[in-house]
Image (cartoon, grey):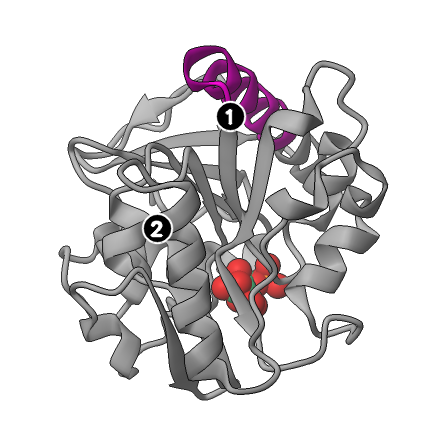
Amino acid sequence: MERPHNSSIFPFDERRDLIVLQTKEEAIAFAAEHWEHTALRSIQRRGRFAVALSGGSTPKPVYEIICRSKKIDWSKVWLFWSDERAVSPDSSESNYHMVMEAGFQHLSIPKAQIFRMRAEKEIQKGAKMYEEAIHTHLVPSLFDLVLLGLGEDGHTASLFPETQALEETTRLVRENSTPKGERMTLTFPCIQQSSHVTFLIFGKAKASIVREVLGAPLISSWPASRVGTPENKALWILDSEAAQKIFK
Ligand code: 6PG
């Protein structure tokens, strides 16, 4: 496939769109703008924006920009997470903690519209409670946007290679025993039914796995290869370092 000459969204295949920004800073800025645009459009069309935020280190600078938006009516935002570690909410390992520290703690999102994944104890019960919250507040539609990252082993959210949650076909949320410990995660059925799914992937350390996942069949040893459908294409937002092996 020819690399597009300018930074615009282009179809990679029938399930994924890509955009490659020259620098990490441009990719961060684009990702924040895309989040804001998706939020405004969702609030305009359906009166709410239900978003599942990804964890890890990549998205924090994007969240810091998003929190400075002057256009979003935060009272219409419903905040969820794509996954969580089995740690307390004030742990530096917590995805909830990272998001709040990035600035979401200062926003006027009603507390009743912030849904922390309670993964630190009784994780199975916590996963069931999280699923109930999605059914109560979102179903029949699910998320307006799910943000995801990509691990160097091809995991996304907490859907790690060769773990049980990969095989889940009905539950929207579940506990998962992973090489990085006990996790709570959205499942493929949940992610695939959401209106928009966006991967944020920056840096040369991800270049090899980006090429592997994009080149893999739908079902592969890389869980992230399953994300994206012709009806709800996944958007991959990359900087040129992360994309450097795609077009080789
Ligand atoms: C987590 C994330 C996980 C993350 C990838 C990429 O809880 O760690 O949800 O899926 O997105 O591991 O992590 P980095 O952004 O730190 O590379």
Q: Determine the secondary structure under disc 1.
A: loop
Q: How far apart are labels 1 and 2 at the CA level?
A: 15 Å
Report whether 57 appears left or right of 230: right
Q: Position of residue 180 (x, y in %)?
A: 52, 85
Label 2 neighbourhood size at 10 Å, few (<14), some (14-19), many (20+)?
some
Which quadrant, please, contains the C terminus?
top left
Residue 156 visible somewhere in the drawing: no
- Residue 135's disc is 2
Counting from the top left corner in percent of width and height, residue 105 is at: 81, 47
| Secondary-structure class at tag 2 | helix
On the image, numbered disc 1 is attached to which residue?
Answer: 48
The residue positioned farthest toward the top in the image shown: 44
Q: Residue at x 51, y 25 (%)?
A: 48
Q: Is 221 left or right of 80, judged from the image as shown? A: left
Name the quarter showing ligand 1: bottom right
Distance from mark 2 CB to nearest ligand 1 atom below 8 Å: no
Across and down, in percent, residue 30 comes to 60, 26
**Which numbered disc, 1 or 2, marks the residue that appears first in the sequence?**
1
In this view, the residue in front, 142 or 29, is: 142
Residue 40 lies in magenta, yes or no? yes
Q: Residue at x 13, y 56 (%)?
A: 217
Q: Quadrant of the N terminus?
A: top left
Q: How many marks?
A: 2
User: What's under tag 2, amino acid-wise?
Assistant: His
Q: Main secondary structure of the magenta part?
A: helix
| Residue type at the position of mark 1 | Arg
What is the quadrant of residue 161 in the picture? bottom left
Residue in the picture at 15% in, 33% down: 230
- Left or right position of 116 against 194: right
* Whether residue 219 can be seen here: yes
- Mark 1 or 2, closer to the camera: 2
Magenta-drawn segment: 31-48
